[in-house]
Amino acid sequence: DAGVTQSPTHLIKTRGQQVTLRCSPKSGHDTVSWYQQALGQGPQFIFQYYEEEERQRGNFPDRFSGHQFPNYSSELNVNALLLGDSALYLCASSLRLGADTQYFGPGTRLTVL
Amino acid sequence: GQNIDQPTEMTATEGAIVQINCTYQTSGFNGLFWYQQHAGEAPTFLSYNVLDGLEEKGRFSSFLSRSKGYSYLLLKELQMKDSASYLCAVRDQNSGYALNFGKGTSLLVTP
């Protein structure tokens, strides 16, 4: 049973560029959340998708957008990259909206130069 | 909003017991979670508390007191592989299902 998978593993971009990160949820899960984790910090909630709609959003600017596909996989897009966007981006899936446990993927390490 | 506080670093000896505390402030508490995160890896779920009391899972136990806004994670019979960051996260009914994480406690287990 595959867990949460994310791609790519690492990514290097320059300021002003755009990036797309991808996530496939754990088998049977239909809800995907995205988190940003800066070095030495806890993960910060970006947004959550369920039934292909953004259901909840954290305190992130509109440069951060997402999408969920019919197969429940999800994308995180970040436009106009800033140096401060350098972080580990984690995807978490859960069995349903409001499920108690979120399972995290290995993350994508984004470096903005 | 929520304030979640936990110690930045702790050190303990192999075979010993360590307690990692977490305090929080929230207006609509709806669950507290503990995750373990090894360096460069994804957080892995350890425990979930929504009612007061102690939840035990093998070597790991988690305690919650909602009236005090307090939780702890207890690790027994420490092993070297327990060296990791331990993240306390709170879910607030006013924030839906998002998890609000503390900064994590980096635990170092020494021989």
Image (cartoon, coloured by chain):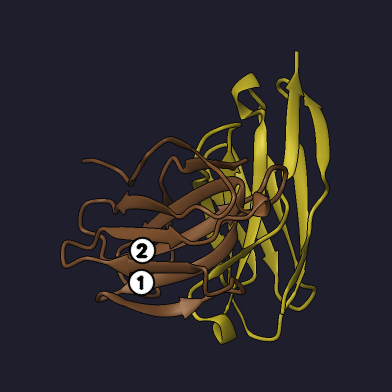
Chain colours: A brown, B yellow
Front residue of this view, candidates B9 and A56: A56
Q: Amino acid at mark 2?
A: Val
Residue occupied by mark 2: A32
Q: Residue at x 21, y 41 (%)?
A: A1
On-image quarter of the C terminus of chain A: top right
Q: Quadrant of residue B85?
A: top right
Label 1: how many Cα within 10 Å (few below 14, some 14–19, many 20+): many
Q: Is residue B25 visible?
A: yes
Is B51 above or below relative to A87?
below
Residue A19 relative to residue B101: left or right: left
Front residue of this view, candidates A75 and A82: A82
Q: Is residue A101 visible?
A: no
Front residue of this view, candidates B18 and A66: A66
Q: Which numbered tag is attached to residue A49?
A: 1
Q: Secondary structure at mark 1?
A: strand
Q: Residue at x 47, y 70 (%)?
A: A47
Q: Are marks 2 and 1 on the same chain?
A: yes
Marks 2,1: beta carbons within 8 A? yes
Q: Quadrant of residue B93?
A: bottom right
Q: Residue at x 72, y 74 (%)?
A: B2
Q: Quadrant of residue B13?
A: top right
Query: Residue A2's x, y, as percent?
Result: 24, 41
Front residue of this view, candidates B58 and B34: B34
Query: Residue A93's x, y, as percent?
Result: 36, 58
Q: Amino acid at mark 1?
A: Tyr
Is A19 above or below relative to A68?
above
Q: CA distance from mark 2 to mark 1?
A: 5 Å
Label 2: how many Cα within 10 Å (few below 14, some 14–19, many 20+): many
Query: Residue A48's x, y, as percent?
Result: 42, 70
Q: Residue at x 56, y 32 (%)?
A: B40
